[in-house]
Image (cartoon, helix red, strand yellow):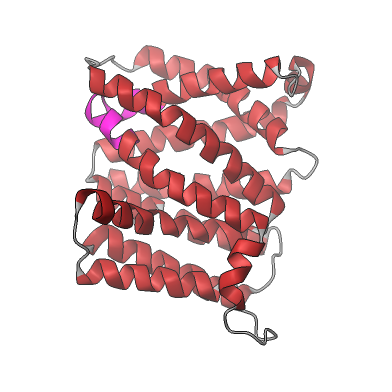
Amino acid sequence: MLWFSLALITALVVAGRDVSVKVLKDLQPLEIAGLELFWSLPILTVGCLLIPIPTLDQTFWWNFILSFPLNITAYFLYLYAIKHSPISLTVPLLALTPVFMIMTGWLILGEKINLWGGAGIFLIFIGSYTINFNRSQNNYFTPFTAIFDDRGSRFMMIVAFIFAFAAVLGKQGMIHSSPLFFSFFFFLIFNIVILLALFLAGNLRLPEILTGYKKGIWLGSLLVTHIGCHGLAISISPAVYMVAVKRSSILFSVLLSWLILHEGEKKTRGLGTLLMFAGVLLITLLG
């Protein structure tokens, strides 16, 4: 059960990173990106040197290139969503990713949704309603509009939609190389490209990156642990099971947001998160 331990560590690290981004109130999203990406570069570089390079075909490079704009967009929207809205309100919306994947599969590929997949979609739908529910609201349709009224929630819904496509491209990239190589190589280039863009645009300065080394090493370590454990876990287990365990990060993120950030609405957001996670499990394992 090594894969389970690695997947669980991945989930915990993702949750830890979410809360860390929120706790660092003195840093803006671009500053967090600079610290995180810069201080993770050394380990990513060493990883790329140690991991065997597989045969790379045209399919690998197409998926690699197409993944770039999607992941860059999702990366920054994710940071802004967590910074501007409560974690317990935004992170659970990532449960919409498998729903979007089912919908795109049905629309584009003609794939059918079975009973379990439909039940999972229903639970996620009810869960997303519940996390925005407030007894003081006179209109029972308010929880639906609340998702679109909150900027962080809107951003996270877009992230969930992007992940539905990025996940497919990433999977293809791993199939045509190896999980570990794709993970480390992709994020090495990803980090370098974003850092160069931020430096050239004047959004980052090297002295600030160096003086913030403690925060940077912490954030960079979380990122690299996430990448490494994800790549190892998915390489030794069925991807569907690994992803299901990794998605428990939404539970850990919400729990940590209560314990560390003291976010409110525990009953409704807690129940909503549980319903959405149950929906993810139904879709991932049985859908």
12 w.r.t. 179: above or below: below
Residue at x-position 69% and y-position 15%: 200
Question: x, y percentage for residue 211?
Answer: 78, 22
Per the image, is 253 magenta?
no
Type of secondary structure dominating the magenta stretch: helix
Q: Is residue 256 visible?
A: no
Per the image, is 174 magenta?
yes
Question: x, y percentage for residue 241?
Answer: 27, 52
Residue 52: image quadrant is top left
Residue at x-position 40% and y-position 30%: 67
Relative to 58, 226 lies left or right: right
Residue at x-position 35% and y-position 34%: 231
106 w.r.t. 211: above or below: below
- Number of marks: 0
Of residues 179 and 4, the one nearer the viewer is: 179
Residue at x-position 68% and y-position 58%: 260
Residue lying at the far front in this picture: please name it: 107
Of residues 192 and 257, the one nearer the viewer is: 192
Relative to 140, 44 lies left or right: left
Of residues 253 and 279, the one nearer the viewer is: 279
Q: Magenta segment range?
A: 170-183
Q: Is residue 146 visible?
A: yes
118 w.r.t. 24: above or below: below
Question: x, y percentage for residue 134?
Answer: 65, 80
Quadrant of the rendering where the C terminus is positioned: bottom left
Question: x, y percentage for residue 239?
Answer: 26, 45
Relative to 194, 285 lies left or right: left
261 w.r.t. 51: above or below: below
